[in-house]
């Protein structure tokens, strides 16, 4: 006997995305991917490497643990984290040797300087993609375990086939940076032409059609009484004109009185059903 599949949980909408042009973020991640590609091509030419930029994504989230380098700009705070295998890979290309030779080495001052240089270059690419002028900034180490409220996390996959490298660089953008980014993306969109109105706007109560059903009476019979019925039998009922149920989609919402008007039965004196 097969086990029934569990229902798919409904998607939860992040409140930080509501009413914001997040559908335009691929434009930003595409620009940043190009900028990071240009940066890595400089290392490729200098060291005859083959660094490649893979998928770049940006979403609300929590920061990864590690040695983050942060900088405060005129717009907001940005932070950068490079996985160590990426830094060691560049060191192997720069000073010779293989990635396996330096994989288990202790961190040195040379590695820290190279990490700071790469973070500075990466954050410069982010500034460029944000449309900010290139400015000098001071980097500070920070053991960031999570983003501040309103922060977003950018992830970019970096690979080097000859070394078998598969790494990820992380960039954190605080709420102020994200506000700047989303405003920039929205300002670059052509304004939408207003839709022509063929009819004057009406109140919702006048535009919403609701089908009402009136239940004049309800009679309860036992199964035996029902089976005993024969053609021509009479079922005594009593119509209460003051307690007619008014239903919408099978639910009783009102009670009403029944009145006659020009030979037709009408409902009047509506009251909310308890």
Image: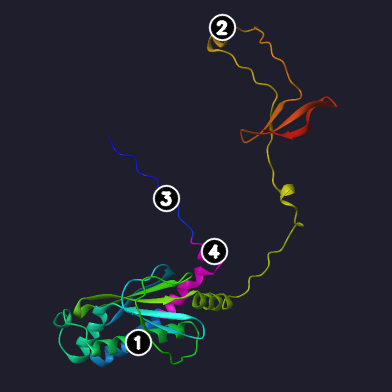
Quarter where residue 44 is shown: bottom left
Name the side, left or right, on which 180 lies relative to 253.
left
Examine the image and state in which quarter residue 229 appears.
top right
Distance from Cα at disc 4 to Cα at disc 2: 63 Å
Q: Position of residue 87 (x, y in %)?
A: 26, 83
The circle drawn on residue 60 is none
Question: How far, Cα to Cα, is label 3 from label 4?
Answer: 20 Å
- Identify the residue at horizontal 39%, vertical 77% (top origin): 171
Helix, strand or loop under label 2: helix
Among the two numbered marks 4 and 1 on one chain, the one whose residue lies closer to the N terminus: 4
Residue at x-position 68% and y-position 64% = 195
Q: Dot 3 lies on which element?
A: loop
The residue wearing badge 2 is 228
Name which of mark 3 and mark 4 comes first in the sequence.
Answer: 3
Q: Nearer the viewer, residue 235 or 190?
A: 235
- Which residue is disc 3 drawn over? 9
Tell us which disc is closer to us: 1 or 3.
Answer: 3
Estimate the x, y position of residue 81 in percent, counting from the top left. Answer: 34, 78
* Position of residue 122 in the picture relative to residue 240 (left or right): left
Element at badge 4?
A: loop
In the image, residue 96 above or below residue 2:
below
The residue under label 1 is: 39
**Marker disc for residue 18:** 4
The magenta stretch is 14-32
Q: Which numbered disc, 2 or 3, marks the residue that appears first in the sequence?
A: 3
Looking at the image, which is closer to me, 165 or 261? 165
Real-space Cα separation, disc 1 to disc 3, in angstroms: 41 Å
Cα gap from disc 4 to disc 1, whole angstroms: 34 Å
């Amino acid at each position: 006997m097969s086990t029934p599949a569990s229902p798919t949980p409904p998607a939860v909408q992040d409140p930080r995305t509501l009413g914001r042009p997040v559908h335009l973020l691929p434009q930003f991640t595409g620009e940043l991917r190009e900028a990071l590609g240009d940066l890595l091509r400089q290392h490729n030419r200098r060291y005859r490497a083959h660094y490649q930029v893979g998928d770049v994504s940006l979403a609300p989230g929590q920061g990864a643990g590690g040695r983050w380098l942060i900088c405060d700009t005129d717009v907001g705070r940005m932070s950068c984290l490079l996985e160590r295998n990426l830094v060691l890979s560049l060191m192997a290309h720069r000073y010779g040797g293989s990635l396996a030779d330096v994989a288990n080495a202790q961190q040195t001052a040379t590695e820290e300087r190279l990490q700071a240089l790469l973070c500075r270059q990466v954050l410069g690419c982010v500034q460029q993609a944000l449309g900010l002028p290139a400015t000098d900034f001071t980097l500070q180490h920070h053991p960031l375990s999570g983003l501040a409220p309103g922060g977003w996390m950018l992830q970019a996959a970096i690979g080097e086939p000859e070394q078998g490298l598969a790494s990820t660089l992380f960039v954190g953008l605080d709420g102020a940076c994200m506000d700047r980014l989303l405003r920039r993306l929205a300002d670059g969109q052509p304004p939408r032409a207003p839709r022509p109105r063929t009819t004057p706007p009406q109140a919702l109560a006048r535009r919403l059609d609701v089908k009402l059903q009136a239940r004049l009476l309800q009679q309860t019979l036992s199964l035996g009484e029902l089976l005993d019925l024969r053609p021509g039998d009479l079922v005594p009922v009593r119509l209460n004109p003051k307690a007619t149920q008014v239903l919408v989609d099978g639910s009783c919402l009102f009670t009403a009185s029944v009145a006659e008007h020009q030979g037709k039965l009408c409902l009047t004196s509506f009251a909310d059903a308890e």
